[in-house]
Structure formats: C-alpha cells, structure tokens
Amino acid sequence: MDRPIRVLVAKPGLDGHDRGAKVVARALRDAGMEVIYTGLRQTPEQIVNAAIQEDVDCIAVSILSGAHNTLLPKVAKLLSAEDASDILLVGGGVIPDSDIPFLKENGIAEIFTPGTPTSVTIDFIKGNVKR
Amino acid sequence: MDLEKKLLEGNKRAAARMITLVENRDPAAFDLLKKLHNKTGDAYVIGITGPPGAGKSTLTDKLVKSFLNEGKKVGVIAIDPTSPFTGGAILGDRVRMGDLSTHKDVFIRSMGARGSLGGISEGTSAAIKVLDVYGADYIIVETVGVGQSEIDIVKNCDTTVMVMVPGLGDDIQAIKAGIMEIGDVFAINKSDRDGAKKTAREIDAMLDYNDSDWRPPVTMTVAMKNEGIDTLVETIVEHREYMKSNGLFETRRIDNARNEIVELVKHKVLSHLFDNAYNEQMICRLSENVVKRTTDPYTACEEIMVTIKN
C-alpha cells in the first residue's frame, strides 16, 4: 500500500473561521490522506515547526482575515529558511483573484478560492507533492 | 542528511524523517534502528488512554508543560483513528497542544492507527525508539480513544494513565474486563462536572477487588483549568518508583519486548502469506460457495491452509 499523503491544515493569525478548513480536512481524509489540523491562531513559526515535526508533504493554509499577503509569504520564507521548500504550500479562503499572482511569486503553489470543488484541491495536492 | 548523526544530535527534522521511514517500514531505517538500539531505553514512556472525549490531549498538553518546568525534554506521539474505508485520517490531537510547537524541548508527532485495532499503530513502537534516541526524557503516547478492549498501549509503555470522565456508565461498566484492568494510575478529568464524586467512588470500589500490591491512585483533574495536574504527576512518579524498587520495571520491559518480537514476527508471516499464497480467485469462489451453502467457512479455511502449506 502506498503511504498516505500527509497534509497540515493550518489557520494562521487572528482568524476564527475554521468551518472551511474543516470541510477541506474532511474531504482530504475521505481521499485517503492523513490530515493534521493545527487549530486556530497559529503563528507562521508554529505552523512551520509543526510541519517539520509531522514531516508533512503539504501545508494547506486557510485565511479569511485578509492578512494573506503577509502571512502566506511568511510561511514560505520560513520553510525556505528551514530547507523545507519541498513541502507543497497551498492556500484558500477569502483571497481576491488579483492577489493570487503575487502569492504565486512568493512561494505559494496554488490558491483555492471559495466555490472550488474539493476534488480540484485533492487532485492538485496528489499531483504536486514532491515525495 | 546524515540521519544517524542528526538524530543523535537531537535534530527535529531528522527525528521526523526517521519516524516517517519506520512508519512506512523502510528497510534501511530498520537497519539504523538495529544499530542504535543500545542508545534506547533511557526515556520513561507514559501511555495515556481512555474513552474518546475524556480530555486526553488537553491532559497531555498539561503534563508536557509540567515536565518542561522540570527542565526535561518531552516527546509526544498522538494517535487517532484511520478510516477503514479510505485509509485517511484526521489527526486532531495536536490542536490541544498548539502553543508547544515552537518549544525547543518538545517534539509532537501525530500518527494514524492505520488499521491497527489495539488503540495504537504498528509504527508506534518504532517511533518511541526514535524519540528515545533523539533525546526525550519522557515520551507520552496518547492513544486513540479506547473503547473497552484496545489495550495495546500497556505493552508499549512503563506507566499507563487511564483517563475517565464522569457520567459514562455505572458500576457495571466499571467492573468489565479490559480497560479497567490496565490503568496504573487513574485520572477523572472534567471533574468539575456532575457525577465526578460518584465516578470516583465507583472506580475505588472496583479497585477494591484488585489483587496486586499496587493500588492505582485516582486523581481528580480539570485539565482545561490546569487543576490536579501536579497531583497526577506525583502519582506517575510514585508508580515509577514502585516499579523500580520491586524489579517490576525490568519485568514489564521484558514483557513488552517479548510482545514486540511476536508482533513483528506475526506481521512478517502475514505479509509473506499475502505476498505468496493469497489467491483472490480462490477466495472469491469459496466466499460464494459459503453463501450458496456448498461449503462452510471452516472447510474453506482448511482448503486454503492446504494451498499455503504447499
């Protein structure tokens, strides 16, 4: 049996809305992945530390607070500093389309905005994890 | 990355990578474990078990903090159920330990049970060894919420903490075999709820029937409010001292080692069987015949055994 893909679903910053993150977590579980959920109010440092200890293949960040242009690149930078950029970094939440190019230039592989079918997210993760 | 060197240095990345490798049965990783076996054995392993929702993760978080206060290094292995249908899992114990992720002396790893029915995963024993070599003074293994018979945790730790909550059953539940026999130390968590004193009385009454020299202490805790934790830690230390002063610590570890060897052999034998003798066509035919009543499961089994022996 192939080993399951491990995904860290992370909620950074001061954003208490995790319904979406839990829906995605559940969908990933149903797709055979092991999903570690960080809980709320995580700092980028806590997220990256957790990702390393859990040896995940992917970090899926959920942000609805508007702080994505700061927090997402911060996570990417920290991963790079830890020599862990092989971990696939994706995001979702309330993120305007116009911000997506900037995020992709700063280490985020893909953004899944509201309305994206979970199957799209699942297929992307399966197709793009490095290990 | 030189895994061996980094692991011995206490590098978290190396420990994490090593746990992944042993969990997925990488042969080279097991070779490394063989080599490092004499560097294991120093960590004290505490098992935390109990029904789902008892507060095991929250309690673990508080225990970790207590050990950190003593200047100790702590490893945590938190196990959650794997879906038997999809192979996926939500590993949600870490949520209760969110602020520990950046502490330099804590390592937390979530594992899916991946088909094991005993409350812990097959990779758990190996992961414990990795954290031992990594340098943890204490390793806390938090199991899947135990129902009534998932007791494998006992065979993998030095002290088992059974976490109960008030109101989950009456005194008949308390005397059923299985989980009530395995607690070295009991914690009644969420003890600010109604029925806590009654639960404590029922457990005490059940413990009156015990034969052994060791009377498991029962501590009332409210993990969320950090109440009762110091007392609980004292009871764990008490148990450790009791075991060490009676030679029972070593006896238990020998029993655990025996169990581990047997489980490893069982796994190897079953894998070999499935790789070499499993015949899907034959099993399908036999299953249909069982339902058609042209054979029965016991005869079907014998037929398969003949194939295996050949």
Image: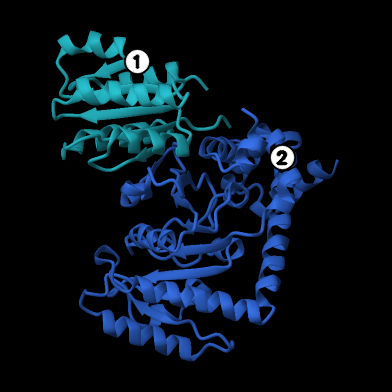
Chain colours: A cyan, B blue
The three-letter code of the residue at mark 1 reads Ala
Quadrant in the picture for residue A109: top left
Q: Secondary structure at mark 2?
A: helix
Residue B271 in view of the camera: no
Q: Disc 1 sits on a residue from what chain?
A: A
**Mark 1 Cα within 10 Å, few/some/many (few <14, many 20+)?**
some
Residue A71 placement (x, y as % from top left)? 24, 26
Q: Which residue, given by chain and number where applicable, does mark 2 sit on?
A: B32
Residue at coordinates 47% horizontally, 86% vertically from top-left?
A: B207
The answer to whether dots 1 and 2 both sit on one chain is no
Give the percent coordinates (x, y) of residue B202.
Answer: 36, 85
Q: Please tell me which residue lies in front, A84 or B248.
A: A84
Is disc 2 surrounded by few (<14), some (14 to 19) or many (20+) residues within 10 Å? some
- Residue B64 in percent (x, y) is at 41, 59
B272 is higher (above) or lower (below) than B302: above
User: Would residue B295 be visible to someone looking at this image?
Assistant: yes
Label 1, secondary structure: give it: loop
Please give the residue where the numbered disc 1 appears in the rendered image: A109
Residue B289 position in % (x across, y down): 62, 43
Query: Which residue is more in the foreground, B277 or B275?
Result: B275
Q: Residue furthest right?
A: B310
Q: CA distance from mark 1 to mark 2?
A: 35 Å
Image quadrant holding the N terminus of chain A, namely top right
**Residue under the image location 47 percent in, 23 percent down:** A83
Label 2 marks a residue whose chain is B
Q: In the image, what residue type sits under mark 2?
A: Leu
| Comparing labels 1 and 2, the label whose residue is closer to the camera | 2
Q: Nearer the viewer, residue A37 or B147?
A: A37
Please indicate whether residue B291 sits to the left or right of residue B144 in the image: right
Camera-nearest residue between B5 and B290: B5
